[in-house]
Image (cartoon, helix red, strand yellow):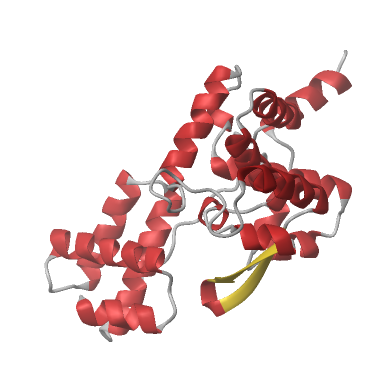
C-alpha cells in the first residue's frame, strides 16, 4: 500500500483523494483478500452497489481501476454505474432564504458567519476551497488554487464583497492569515462550518435540509446563469471539467417547477 500511495502522490492527486483511494483499496482487500479475480471484482462491485449511493460506488470503482492499473492486473476493469440525472435540482437554498440568513446574521452581529455565507454564495467556492481563503486573497480580490490535474483555478471575490470584507477585517485588526479560523487558529473544519450553518438555520426558521455548504455553491451558479447565460464561463468559474456538469444549473429546482406549474395551470 505504501508503494501505491507513493504512486498516487507522484500522479499529483490531492491528499484527500489519496486517502479516499487508499480506503477503497483497503476495503477491497478486507473483503476479497490479496488474490483478485474477475469474478471477485464483479461481486465486490455488486456489493458496493447494494450498500452505497451510486456516486460513492463510482468513486470506489475509479480507485479500484487505478489500483488495478498500478498492479498491472491482467483482467477486467470495472465499469461505472450509470447515474440517472434528476430533471430538477434538489435541496438548493432559495434566494429568499439566503438573503434572510445573510441579513439576519448581519443584524445579530454574527459577522464571522455572515461572511462565511456570503463567501460561499458569492464566489461559488467548495467547502475545501472556502477554508483556503486568506486575508491577503481578500485584499487582492481573488484566490488562486491548484486544482485536480495540477490546473490553476482562480476564484474571484466580487468587488462589493471584497469591500465589505476588508471593512470587517479592519475592525478586527487582522492583516494576514486564513480568513475563517477556528479556536485553534487553523482553518475551521468542514464539519464545524456545516454544523454552524445548521444551527443558524434552526435559529432563523430556515429548512435545515437546504442549508449546507454546497447548497450556497448551487445558489451562486443559479444566480449567475440567470444574469449571464455564458455557461462556458460559469463552468470555468465553478472549476468544472465538463460543460455537462454545469448544465444542471439550467434546470429549475423542484420548488421552482412546482411554482411554475401552479402559476400556469388554472383549468
Image quadrant where one finds the C terminus: top right
Residue at figure coordinates x 74%, y 38% from the top left: 252
Residue drawn 68% across the image and 24% down it: 104
Q: Measured along the vertical axis of the image, is residue 6 above or below residue 241?
A: below
Q: What quarter of the picture does the N terminus occupy? A: bottom left
Q: Position of residue 74 (x, y in %)?
A: 27, 85
At x 43%, y 53%, the residue is: 186
For residue 251, side relative to residue 27 (left or right): right
Q: Quadrant of residue 69?
A: bottom left
Q: How many marks can you see?
A: 0
Q: Where does the image place residue 96, in percent across and percent down from the top left?
A: 75, 27
Q: Residue 67: image x %, image y %?
A: 30, 76
Question: On screen, 91 above or below 74?
Answer: above
Q: Is residue 29 left or right of residue 243?
A: left
**Visible residue check, residue 186:** yes
Q: In the image shown, does 51 or 227 lie closer to the viewer?
A: 227
**Residue 218 in view, yes or no:** no
Quadrant of the rendered image containing residue 70: bottom left
In this view, the residue in front, 114 or 126, is 114
Is 260 positioned to the left or the right of 11 in the image?
Answer: right
Q: Is residue 119 left or right of residue 185?
A: right
Q: Is residue 176 above or below residue 3?
A: above
Amino acid at each position: 500500500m505504501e508503494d501505491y500511495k507513493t504512486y498516487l502522490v507522484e500522479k499529483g492527486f490531492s491528499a484527500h483523494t489519496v486517502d479516499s483511494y487508499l480506503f477503497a483499496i483497503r476495503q477491497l482487500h478486507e473483503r476479497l483478500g490479496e488474490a483478485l479475480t474477475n469474478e471477485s471484482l464483479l461481486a465486490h462491485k455488486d456489493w458496493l452497489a447494494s450498500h452505497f449511493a451510486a456516486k460513492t460506488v463510482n468513486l470506489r470503482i475509479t480507485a479500484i481501476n487505478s489500483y488495478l492499473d498500478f498492479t498491472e492486473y491482467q483482467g477486467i476493469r470495472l465499469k461505472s454505474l450509470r447515474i440517472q440525472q434528476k430533471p430538477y435540482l434538489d435541496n438548493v437554498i432559495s434566494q429568499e432564504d439566503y438573503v434572510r440568513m445573510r441579513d439576519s446574521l448581519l443584524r445579530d452581529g454574527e459577522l464571522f458567519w455572515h461572511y462565511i455565507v456570503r463567501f460561499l454564495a458569492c464566489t461559488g467556492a467548495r467547502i475545501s476551497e472556502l477554508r483556503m481563503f486568506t486575508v491577503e486573497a481578500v485584499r487582492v480580490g481573488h484566490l488562486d488554487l491548484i486544482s485536480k490535474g495540477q490546473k490553476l483555478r482562480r476564484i474571484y471575490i466580487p468587488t462589493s464583497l471584497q469591500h465589505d470584507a476588508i471593512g470587517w477585517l479592519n475592525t478586527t485588526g487582522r492583516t494576514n492569515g486564513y480568513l475563517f479560523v477556528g479556536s485553534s487558529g487553523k482553518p475551521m473544519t468542514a464539519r464545524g462550518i456545516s454544523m454552524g450553518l445548521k444551527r443558524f438555520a434552526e435559529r432563523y426558521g430556515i429548512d435545515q435540509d437546504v442549508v449546507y455548504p454546497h447548497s450556497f455553491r448551487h445558489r451562486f451558479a443559479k444566480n449567475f446563469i440567470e444574469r449571464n447565460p455564458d455557461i462556458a464561463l460559469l463552468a470555468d468559474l465553478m472549476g468544472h471539467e465538463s460543460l455537462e456538469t454545469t448544465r444542471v444549473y439550467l434546470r429549475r429546482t423542484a420548488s421552482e417547477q412546482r411554482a411554475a406549474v401552479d402559476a400556469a395551470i388554472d383549468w
